[in-house]
Amino acid sequence: MELQHIHPEPTSFLRKHLFSTDHKVIAKQFLWAGLLFLAFGGGLAMLIRWQWAFPGEPVPVVGSMLFQQSGGAITPAHYNTIFTMHGLIMIFFAITPIMIGAFGNFCIPLMIGARDMAFPLLNMLSFWTFLVSQGLIIASFFVQLGSAAAGWTTYAPLSTNVGTPGAGQTLVVAAVFVTGVATIMGGINYVTTVVRLRAPGMTYMRMPATVWGLWLTAILNVLFVPVLGSAALLLLLDRSFGTQFYIAGSSAVRGGGDPILFQHLFWIFGHPEVYILILPPWGFVTDLVSFFARKPAYWYKGSVMAMTGVTVLSAVVYGHHMFVTGMNPLLGQSFMTLTLIISVPAELLFLNWLHTIWKGSIRLTAPMLFALGTVFVFGLGGLTGLFLGTISTDLYLHDTMFVVGHFHLTMAAAAFLASFAAIYFWFPKMFGRNMNQTLAKWHFWFSVIFITLVFCGQLVAGYGGHQRRLYDPYQYTFLQHMQPLNRWTSYFGFILAASQVTFVVNWFQSIFAGSKAEQNPWEIGTLEWTVPSPPVHHNFDVIPTVHRGPHEYANPEVKKALGRDWIGQSEELPKSGKAPAEPAAAAS
Amino acid sequence: MGAIVPYPPPRARQEWTAYLGMVIFLGSWAMMFGSLFFAYGMVRARATAWPPPDLPELPLALPGVNTAVLAASSVMLQLAVRWLRVGKTRWVGPGLAASLALGTLFLCLQMVTWRRLLDEGLTPSGGPYPSVFYALTCFHALHVLVGIGALAWLCRGAFVGKYSAARFLPVRLWAMYWHFVGAVWGVMFVTVYVV
């Protein structure tokens, strides 16, 4: 019974490596594009940190090249562009392509036992659309008045022509719209693929948690990225055609529109976006802690339900970003209650991870270390979120560095560490070569220690009343004593950036000269490890039949029959009459 | 947990997959238009007068006729899908052509509406009232334009006999898109023109 067509492998270079419809090639393309922009966004972050440590002083090495007219120092106009583009690049053009573009593409078909995505051509178009948006971003730096400078949130009316004239901001808003279209294309593909192309026997509750995380993310993307699209569209119309959706005050015609409208649209998208960026890490972590603790994931169903619960709740909490916009207090309190309810499923996930590693035979491989690091920084980020979700404390902390520290711990640090967990884990399967584990562990320890120190430094500054986005905080007497703290935070930031060299070296060394990877180097039971590394063009010669869940470790029956502590999802237990136990039953 | 999921034959499976993809795409796009209507509602709730006393009111007659035109176009397309499925392949080409002609007529009438309003002094930069009108109708018209292109392509395929009861998926998927665009127009007509 032939279930899905085997498409012949393309032979021309263009169709094989450039305009490929193969999900594995597209995944690599997204990974390269995302990593390059991660370095770009990281460079911008270093400039911000320099400015907060030594405001007005010439930037060493690159300053004389980038800021010629001011003698190498960052000017206020440049500063605005730098922090705006740091945020936008990291969220839409680095983390999103790495986690969703690369690992969504790579993992979903392989882990559910499919030959490719449901719509391979759409998949290719998604990548090329995304590349156009990256091109727009780069172009925006070379137009008059420079790139966008209205903050990554692009709040109106600052982001309209009144606050930020010039083609740069327009190009960036257009880039956000275009990347949104690319994301929706990808999202349609992921949702459909998971619903339609699961191998026989791969029930929803047998899917690896990674697929669950990526699938729920895709659902949120499909539903809420269009809302960002409409916000960007109206902003583009305001900027280019003189409409009046967001304009208010003296520049308004006949009463003008409503700047708060932008905040509503932005955060209706923006809060689900937070979970769009954290659900894939949750999925990775749920799987990796089980894989490397050599134990079934503790209450796997509970973790899945928690992730689904968060997905649903994420749609109804966006108002907590707008407590200080003059919102009706009753509405504010409802949003506060809903927001704090999210901590319940998040807590549940957290406890499940701890229970999974409890008394496990932990193998501290690089991916496991990164997964545990993700748990740690996400814990810090989640706890600080409680202060911001509560109105009475948010009124004090709003728009301070505390907010910056909080969302960097959740969205940046957790997403960053989880992305590297995924890279180190799936690299052998993706490229067919092993990465250097020693360098990877150095990379981990430097990353987790200094990323925590950087963002905790921001939390402390914010708690002391340091406003975010200040060009020169020390113009204010009450912030002058923050300079030593900020300098230390900056030093930690510089070390964090410098230590990424360990990854860059490892990456290139492994791609070009790494030792050949075995089919299943980690001894894992999910389907992608049943095919060669790297997988053949059509993934599976025969579509596998799935017999059990993804976390079948330390099962005594398997140990007795096979002499090892794991069994593949599609593997049959030799000459045993009854089916092996389900993971949930084994955990309890 | 669960027996092995039954696997239907490949072609039926592929059709279902494409159908589901289209449903998800339209759901996504519904969120986009929904947000635009939300924006309209907020801007309008904030305005003191709608329309402002010095600006012309939107016409009702021509857009009303236009609503009927677009609805008729949708009906013709649905009939074409029906004929395709029951095997009356001969009728499909003319059916698609009629749908295409009605869709084009819709766009022409829409242009007449814009032209008249521009002549009366309703420009996009004249405040929130014309902003909403032009943004929503133009964004919708772009979708109609895409639909017209697709209908023309389907039409060409139908006249060279590309589609049959066994191969009607492209027609059916574009019909879903076209009905969606029509439904959005219905909401737009009621909220922007009538209310």
Image (tube, coloured by chain):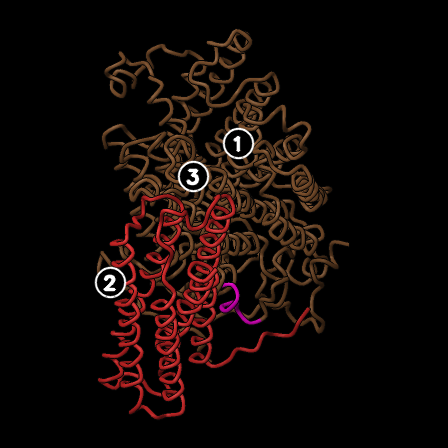
Chain colours: A brown, B red
Find the magenta span and give its range. A193-200
**Where residue B81 sits in the image (x, y, percent)?**
38, 83
Instruction: Quadrant for residue A379, please give it.
Output: top right
Looking at the picture, which amino acid does disc 1 mark? Answer: His
Q: Residue at x 46, y 37 (%)?
A: A259
Q: Residue at x 39, y 75 (%)?
A: B71
Q: Which residue is mark 3?
A: A255
**Labels 3 and 2 touching (C-beta < 8 A):** no
**Labels 1 and 3 touching (C-beta < 8 A):** no
- Foreground of the two, A470 or A375: A470
Residues marked 1 and 3, same chain: yes
Mark sitting earlier along the chain (3/2): 2
Residues marked 1 and 2, same chain: yes
Label 1 – label 2 distance at C-alpha: 44 Å
Lateral position of residue B27 relative to residue A168, left or right: right
Mark sitting earlier along the chain (1/3): 3
Residue extending farthest front:
B53
Labels 3, 2: front one: 3
Labels 1, 3: front one: 3
Which numbered tag is attached to residue A408? 1
Query: Is residue A308 in sight in this rendering?
Result: yes
Q: Residue at x 57, y 36 (%)?
A: A322
**Where residue A412 sits in the image (x, y, percent)?**
51, 34
